[in-house]
Image (tube, rainbow, N blue to C red):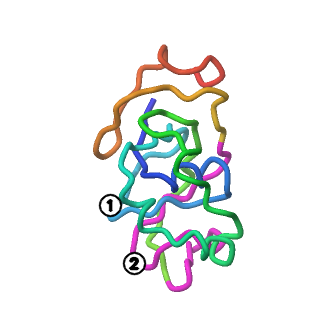
């Protein structure tokens, strides 16, 4: 199964906070299930202003200590990949507060967080994960 490494807090937001688009500088032709791997890096988290999250995204930014890293956390379906327009415009899909203008938006649906994370090293770009290392609900 295909997987992608995503920095925290974005991996958490996809699975728990309604983040319905993954912003990338590159397009993907992948459609269907995609494993969400939380990278170990704290770089993206440290750039966040926790006080702005409720007004920007409608959720509180979790403390770093509550976020899992270095593991596969769940699975989401990639339903499309579009160039993001003004104000988070995703074309035929609803606009999203999570979308960044000028990026490619991987439109996501049906997030399913695992009950237990699966420790694993991440990788650049999309990478393959053997099904036998995943929880039975995903195989």
**Residue stretch in magenta:** 86-111
Question: Relative to residue 130, is residue 12 depicted above or below?
Answer: below
Q: Which residue is label 2 attached to?
A: 102
Give me the residue at 60% from left, 25% from top. Answer: 138
49 shown above or below 129: below
Depth check, front residue: 15 or 66: 66
Quadrant of residue 101 within the rendered picture: bottom left
Tell me residue 40's x, y (percent): 38, 43
Reading the chain from its start, which is encountered first: label 1 or label 2?
1
- Mark 1, Cα crowd under 10 Å, few <14 / some 14-19 / many 20+, is few
Q: Position of residue 80 (x, y in %)?
A: 52, 57
Specify the quadrant of the image occupied by residue 104. bottom left
The C terminus is located in which quarter? top right
Numbered circles on residues, count: 2
Q: What element carries label 2?
A: loop
Q: Residue 59 carries which label?
A: none
| Structural distance between the alpha carbons of marks 1 and 2 | 11 Å
> Could you tell me which residue is drawn at 41 percent across and 36 percent down?
70
Q: Which residue is drawn at 48% across and 68% down?
A: 48
């Amino acid at each position: 199964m295909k997987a992608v490494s995503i920095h925290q807090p974005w991996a958490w937001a996809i699975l728990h906070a309604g983040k319905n688009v993954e912003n990338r500088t590159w397009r993907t032709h992948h459609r269907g299930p995609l494993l969400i791997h939380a990278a170990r890096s704290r770089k993206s988290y440290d750039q966040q202003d926790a006080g702005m999250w409720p007004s920007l995204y409608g959720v509180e930014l979790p403390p770093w200590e509550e976020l899992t890293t270095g593991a596969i956390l769940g699975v989401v379906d990639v339903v499309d990949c579009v160039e993001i327009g003004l104000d988070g415009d995703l074309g035929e899909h609803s606009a999203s507060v999570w979308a960044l203008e000028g990026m490619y938006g991987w439109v996501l649906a049906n997030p399913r967080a695992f009950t237990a994370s699966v420790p694993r090293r991440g990788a650049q770009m999309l990478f393959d994960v053997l099904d036998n290392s995943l929880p039975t609900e995903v195989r």
